[in-house]
Image: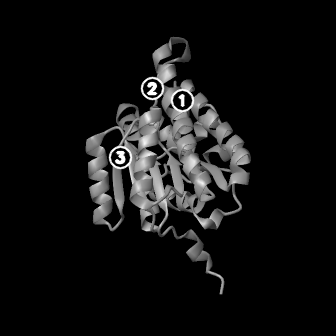
Amino acid sequence: MAAGVLESFRLEGQAAIVTGAGRGLGLAMARALGQAGALLTLVDVNQQDLDQAAAALRAEGSQSLPVLADVTSAAEVEDLVRQTVRAYGGVHVLVNNAGVTTRAPFEDLEQSDWEKVLQVNLGGVYQVSRWTARQMIQQGGGSIVNIASISGLVGNRGGNNSHYCASKGGVIALTRSLAVEWAPKGIRVNAIAPGYFVTPMTDRLKQRDPDFYNELVGRVPLGRFGEDRDLAGAVVYLASRASAFVTGHVLVVDGAYTAW
């Protein structure tokens, strides 16, 4: 008898690497994958965040391997993939979530900030995807989920972060290209483009400029910012067999912000 539809969302025995997993939305997505049964490798540049995240997820019943690594370093990325294979026997899911941003009018943007944001947000996807794909190709396939942003689809009025928008637009283009390139090798490549979410950054904006914060909330037809739970189903769907015929897709999770 064929497995039921809910079974197609399960990830038991599948190893999942999540970058930028020490806190925030990365941790939330790792938690969702763990709840679906995945064996987790948590990657971050902050050891304290990593240790706390791994301890929290283990307490909830998820197997979690914390790996301190810079996603822009080929040597460190190669090692984190090696550690995952050693611990779990392979790599089946990759969530490219690590990202940074700064804010400045583009005419005043320092070259160092431009280079850092592009190097982490787009270069990190390059590094982790290529090393992970080598393992996935040996196994016969896998699922890669890149975390883009609605900032890669529309301009951010008042955001002063055009370099961030450029990096996320690059992630979207790379997602579609790799989906085509790696489809014959059994690797699906999709992206999630979140809208505005409740994060420490938006909390700071709320304190600093409540009028602008409320204006942003008012632009969301659902009338609120996203919360951790709003990404849980999206990442599990794209990571799992439930989306077996979905690749090259950008799943926008924004409360209809970009729909009007």
Q: Is residue 36 above or below residue 250?
A: below
The earlier-in-sequence mark between 1 and 3 is 3
Q: Secondary structure at mark 3?
A: strand
Q: CA–CA distance between discs 2 and 1? A: 8 Å
Q: Which residue is mark 3?
A: 67
Q: Where does label 1 land, which residue?
A: 164
| Closer to the camera in the image, 235 or 217 | 235
Disc 2: which residue:
102
Secondary structure at badge 2 equals loop
The answer to whether the residue labelled 2 contacts the one labelled 1, judged by CB atoms less than 8 Å apart, is: yes
What amino acid type should be assigned to the residue bearing mark 3?
Answer: Val
Amino acid identity at mark 1:
Tyr
Nearer the observer: mark 3 or 2; the answer is 3
The answer to whether residue 63 of the structure is visible from this angle is yes
Q: Residue at x 55, y 17 (%)?
A: 106
Between marks 3 and 2, how big is the CA–CA gap? 25 Å
